[in-house]
């Protein structure tokens, strides 16, 4: 008998995203797909994500990468007429070999700036750098861990200094279609839970718990999001952007 646990395990085993050449992301393994809307605090700083609609998905589905589909977040073939150039240029060296460190009393923060997608979670409460440097204060430490865990791209990771273990949030393999009403635009695809991403040349990117994939087509760091969606005011028509 197939148990729910087995099904989740199978999904994890089969989960994969393939970046097709100048085309969509081909997602396998019936990975759950839903919307997450960024919510801000009273000062306008990103605070957390609120879950919105989920999408029924098949074992395999194709997600728009060029930003031109009329059926977002799914691909409708518009990349062909748009002559989309999806050339992948993102740095493939492992995260830890590229990370700079901010050293605090209780936490170490690792940071790879070129992964930034400019969501802005790290700006609250005077910024994650200051919080890390004050991490002997329990509240500052809690906030630093929370902000790092919300960083869509995984640019920032908080590590317990004593044990050298990362404070990564636990994610089931899933893909979130991010909306950024505080910036008046739609954001990237947030790939969570260590889903392998295979480039169009067949190489697998470093498997990470958090990855932000570009879905507007404008990133200069494809397939990763570099925040260009904010400049181009990319929108998928989500109603949260009108509030
Ligand atoms: S979604 Fe394309 S740059 Fe962010």
Image: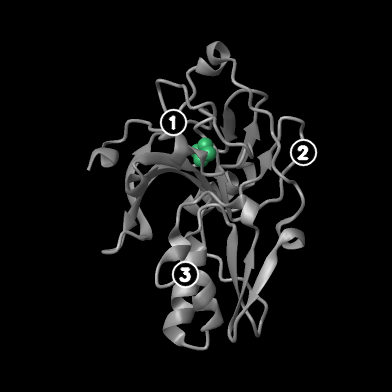
- Where residue 25 sits in the image (x, y, percent)? 58, 31
Choose top left, top right, bottom left or bottom right for residue 222: top right
Residue labelled with disc 1? 73
Question: Is the Cβ of the residue at disc 3 closer than 8 Å to that at disc 1?
Answer: no
Q: Taking 148 as reference, is 175 above or below it?
A: above
Earlier along the polypeptide chain: callout 3 or callout 1?
1
Which of these two is toward me, 68 or 129? 129
* x 62%, y 41%: residue: 14
Give the side of residue 219 with respect to residue 53, left or right. Answer: right
Residue labelled with disc 2? 203
Q: Taking 129 as reference, is 95 above or below it?
A: above
Element carrying mark 2: loop
Q: Is residue 1 visible?
A: no
* x 47%, y 60%: residue: 150
* x 40%, y 42%: residue: 34
Q: How is the image coloured?
A: one colour
Circle 3 packing at 10 Å, graded few (<14), some (14-19), many (20+), is some
The count of marks equals 3
Element carrying mark 1: loop
Q: Is mark 3 within 8 Å of ligand 1?
A: no
Q: Is mark 2 within 8 Å of ligand 1?
A: no
In space, the residues marked 3 and 1 are separated at their CA atoms by 32 Å
Choose top left, top right, bottom left or bottom right for residue 185: top left
- Where residue 157 sits in the image (x, y, percent)? 59, 66
Q: Is residue 19 visible?
A: yes
In space, the residues marked 1 and 2 are separated at their CA atoms by 24 Å
Circle 1 packing at 10 Å, graded few (<14), some (14-19), many (20+), is many
Q: Taking 40 as reference, is 58 above or below it?
A: above
Earlier along the polypeptide chain: callout 2 or callout 3?
3
Q: Give the label on residue 127, or none.
A: 3
Element carrying mark 3: loop
């Amino acid at each position: 008998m197939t148990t729910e646990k087995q099904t989740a395990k199978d999904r994890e085993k089969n989960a994969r995203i393939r970046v097709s050449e100048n085309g969509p992301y081909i997602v396998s393994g019936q990975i759950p797909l839903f919307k997450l809307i960024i919510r801000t605090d009273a000062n306008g700083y990103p605070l957390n994500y609120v879950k919105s609609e989920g999408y029924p998905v098949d074992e395999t589905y194709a997600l728009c990468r060029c930003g031109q589909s009329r059926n977002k977040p799914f691909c409708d073939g518009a990349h062909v007429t748009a002559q989309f150039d999806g050339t992948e240029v993102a740095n493939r060296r492992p995260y830890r070999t590229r990370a700079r460190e901010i050293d605090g009393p209780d936490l170490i923060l690792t940071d790879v700036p070129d992964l930034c997608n400019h969501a802005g979670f790290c700006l609250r409460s005077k910024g994650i750098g200051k919080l890390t440097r004050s991490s002997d204060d329990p509240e500052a430490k809690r906030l630093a861990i929370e902000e790092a865990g919300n960083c869509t791209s995984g640019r920032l990771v908080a590590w317990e200094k004593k044990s050298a273990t990362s404070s990564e949030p636990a994610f089931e393999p899933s893909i979130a279609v991010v909306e950024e009403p505080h910036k008046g635009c739609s954001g990237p695809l947030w790939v969570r839970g260590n889903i392998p991403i295979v480039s169009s040349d067949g190489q697998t990117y470093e498997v990470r718990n958090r990855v932000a994939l570009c879905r507007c087509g404008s990133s200069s760091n494809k397939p990763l999001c570099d925040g260009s969606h904010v400049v181009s005011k990319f929108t998928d028509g989500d109603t949260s952007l009108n509030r």
